[in-house]
Structure formats: C-alpha cells, structure tokens
C-alpha cells in the first residue's frame, strides 16, 4: 500500500527545487501528480512562478496569470487576480534587484518594541529603545 502524504509533505514536494529532491521524493511526487492531473497543472504554475522569483524573470509574468487562472484551484486563481491588480509593481519586484526587505525588517522590529511597552511608556522611552537597540 502506498504511503499517504500529509498536505504539508505534498506541498513541500511541489514547492521544492527539483534538483534538491531525493530520488524517493521524486518518485512520491510523480505518483502524487499522476493521481491528480489538476494538481499537476497547479504544480507547474507554482514552479514557474518560483522560477520567476528566484531568477528575477519579471518579463515572464505576462503569461503566468492566464495559466494560473486556467486551473480549477480557487486559491491559485485568486492569487493571479491579485497580481493583476498591481501588475506593474509585481513585475518590477520580479525584475529589479532592489528590495525593501531591510526597511520592512526595521519596521517590524520597531513595532515589536512599541508593543512591548504598550500602555506603560511614552514616546520618549520608545525613541530611546529604538535608537539604542542594536
């Protein structure tokens, strides 16, 4: 009897780089995708989007939403529609080398400091904690 995969295991197999899969994982993935043709199409969409992100190929984004919306999986279709709402920004994010990751990290750190002193400290203490923090 074949091993039953959990949702997390199946997701891990689909989202992993094919070059990083062990031979037994490749077999499991082929079996999984062989049982469900729709999941095979979704896996193709996921992999092509991951490749665009990893290799900064924003120019390939034009055709991707149409293939994603052709699947029957509602979450994938919804994600594709969301991308179309701000298509230029998504294309720029998948093409350009600049990132706002460091800024977002600092914003998150400041929010944590603010929440830690909620109701107990004023702006001056928050200011000191932000400026003195590493």
Image (cartoon, rainbow, N blue to C red):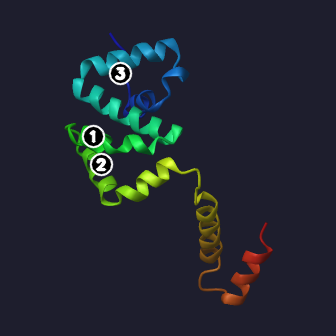
Instruction: Give the alpha-carbon distance from disc 1 to disc 2, as whole Å.
Output: 6 Å
Q: Which residue is mark 1?
A: 68
Instruction: Give the alpha-carbon distance from disc 1 to disc 3, as whole Å.
Output: 27 Å
Q: Are marks 1 and 3 in contact (CB under 8 Å)?
A: no
Q: Secondary structure at mark 1?
A: helix
Instruction: Give the alpha-carbon distance from disc 2 to disc 3, as whole Å.
Output: 30 Å
Residue 99 percent location from the top left of the image = 58, 56
Residue 82 percent location from the top left of the image = 31, 55
Give above or below for 38 relative to 108.
Answer: above
Nearer-the-camera pick, 124 or 46: 46
Residue 41 percent location from the top left of the image = 27, 29
Quadrant for the C terminus, please.
bottom right
Q: Which residue is mark 3?
A: 4
Q: Secondary structure at mark 3?
A: loop
Q: Secondary structure at mark 2?
A: helix
Q: Which residue is mark 2?
A: 80
> Which residue is at a point 62% across and 62% down the rendered structure image?
105
Tell which circle, 2 or 3, labels the residue nearer the N-terminal end: 3
């Amino acid at each position: 009897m074949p091993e039953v995969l959990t949702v997390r295991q199946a997701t891990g197999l689909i989202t992993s780089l094919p070059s990083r899969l062990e031979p037994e994982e490749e077999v499991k993935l082929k079996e999984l995708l062989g049982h469900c043709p729709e999941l095979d199409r979704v896996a193709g969409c996921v992999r092509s989007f991951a490749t665009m992100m990893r290799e900064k190929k924003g120019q390939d984004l034009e055709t991707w939403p149409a293939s994603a919306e052709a699947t029957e999986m509602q979450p994938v279709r919804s994600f594709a529609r969301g991308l179309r709402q701000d298509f230029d920004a998504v294309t720029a994010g998948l093409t350009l080398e600049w990132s706002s990751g460091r800024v977002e990290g600092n914003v998150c750190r400041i929010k944590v400091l603010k929440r830690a002193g909620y109701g107990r400290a004023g702006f001056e203490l928050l200011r000191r904690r932000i400026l003195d923090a590493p």
